[in-house]
Image: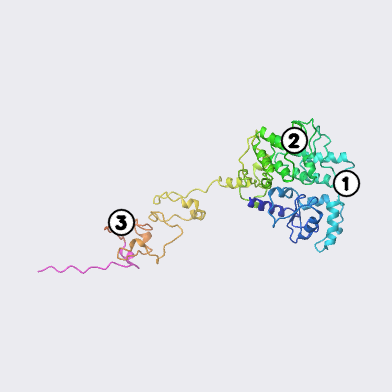
Amino acid sequence: LLELQQAIIRHIQRLPTNDHCADCNSQNDTTWLSINFGVVVCIECSGIHRDLGVHISRIQSLTLDNIGTSQLLLARYMTNQGFNDVMEAKLNAANKPNPSSSMDERYSFIRAKYLEKRFVLRTCTDEHELLSDLEHAVNNNNIYHLLQVFAEGVDLSAPLPSSEFEETALHLAVTRDMGTSLHIVDFLIQNMRSVDLNKPTSSLGSHGGSNSALHICAIHDKPECMKLLLRSGANPNQRNAQDKTPLNIAEERAHHTCEELLRHALSNQKTLFENINIDWNLSHDEGSTDFSDDETVIEDRNGCVTPERKQPSRPPSYTESPVNMRSRSSTCDSLKSNSYRQPMPPPPPPQSKKPLSAPSSVSNVGSLKKRVAPLPPANYGTLPSNHNHNRSPSDPNPNYHTLNHHKRSPSGDSSRGIHLAGAKLVIPPGEIPTLKSTNTEKSCTGSIQRPRGPPPPAPNT
């Protein structure tokens, strides 16, 4: 899980313009993340964000804090440039702080940008138009369109214009989420008042009516949305028009993951809400580990050009999906597995003198390169030997230590017709092998000869 977190953080830091502070363009320790906006700022500007309060900006360190993947969600889809295109649309570049600006200058600018939203371009004329654009942003999973209406002051908790049972943007986003729009849900949750997280639909609504966003999660089996809601303080004890809590609904529908999360919240714990299971769309070089759902970690994809990448992402709540889903592993992991399915180089030509029990030459990458070398002499290498070592004249041969300290010359390995070259000779006790030489002069050159016995005595006359 830690490896996944680091892979996401690396990806966030490599996004365009994220190496510069979103507020002053400084590159000095630009490792501070505004969790609820998904932008990266420098250490100087991060202090001013903290002064504004967590209801405006929630700051965490990408290097010092242990940040769960649920807190990295918005930053994965937002960039500093995209954020500033909305929040600084009317700003004169000369009026923006620079890395050498004083803290007072930074404070005035950051307050005007985030609290007063002074530099936002107004595109809507009234509240109804804002709500229509809000609904359009949710339906299209457009985070920057959502940021635009938020910056223009839309009421995120107001019923949407086309809603039949007073559904809000949060109700709509939770209902529509299929694993690819969780960042939309997260933006709404983090940038609306905590009391509005529990706002119910009308009492005439479907599934009993008066359902909060948590009820909708339990009805439609949306555990990842539920994690975000419970992490932000949504009430798990709230009852709908049928006097049912979200836990009652999860139990009735056998949505076991939602049931577990709700029981976790009712016991005043939050550890299960820190990490979410989604398709993170990471590029291949950011994570080569299989972040599968079975290990409560997330898949690692993005940027991997495969036919699978064109398929829509599956929802995290796959247990009741009628569609046959492919293997629950990352695309980059799939690339790794596919690499093993590529045609292997052809095996070396068979050698009649060499046994088949040499699998190490296949698994050893270095040995594959030796296949282009010419074949050894026909009488060489009758048994497996160390391919990485060539015997030098100074190497002792332990097989001949008992044979009057006799050592073979290097030239004898390939010139003799003896099947002992390069092999270990196993001799029964008390038996000495007979060595034949085809070239006496050649075999004696540079080698130790056996001492000759005295000639036989002359016959008696």
C-alpha gap between disc 3 and disc 1: 96 Å
3 vs 1, front mark: 1
Q: Name the residue under label 3.
A: 427
Answer with left or right where residue 351 lies relative to residue 93.
Answer: left
Q: Residues within 10 Å of mark 3 (few under 14, many from 20)?
A: few
Q: Is residue 380 above or below residue 293?
A: below
Q: Which amino acid does label 2 sit on?
A: Arg
C-alpha gap between disc 3 and disc 2: 88 Å
Q: Which of 42 and 388 is in front in this view?
A: 42
**Secondary structure mostly seen in the magenta stretch:** loop
Could you tell me residue 341's position as x and y percent?
Answer: 56, 45
Q: Name the residue under label 1.
A: 122
Identify the secondary structure beneath mark 3.
Answer: loop
The residue range painted magenta reads 439-461
Q: Which mark is residue 153?
A: none
Q: Do the CB atoms of the residues marked 3 and 2 lie less than 8 Å apart?
A: no
Of the residues under marks 3 and 1, which one precedes in the sequence?
A: 1
Answer with left or right where residue 40 lies relative to residue 309.
Answer: right
Q: Is residue 460 above or below residue 352?
A: below
- Residue at image x 83%, y 44%? 149
Q: Mark 2 points at which residue?
A: 239
Q: Is residue 448 magenta?
A: yes
- As drawn, the residue found furthest toward the left would be 461
Q: Which amino acid does label 1 sit on?
A: Arg
Identify the secondary structure beneath mark 2.
Answer: loop
- Residue at image x 63%, y 43%? 293
Could you tell me residue 438's position as x and y percent?
Answer: 31, 60
- Residue at image x 41%, y 62%? 391
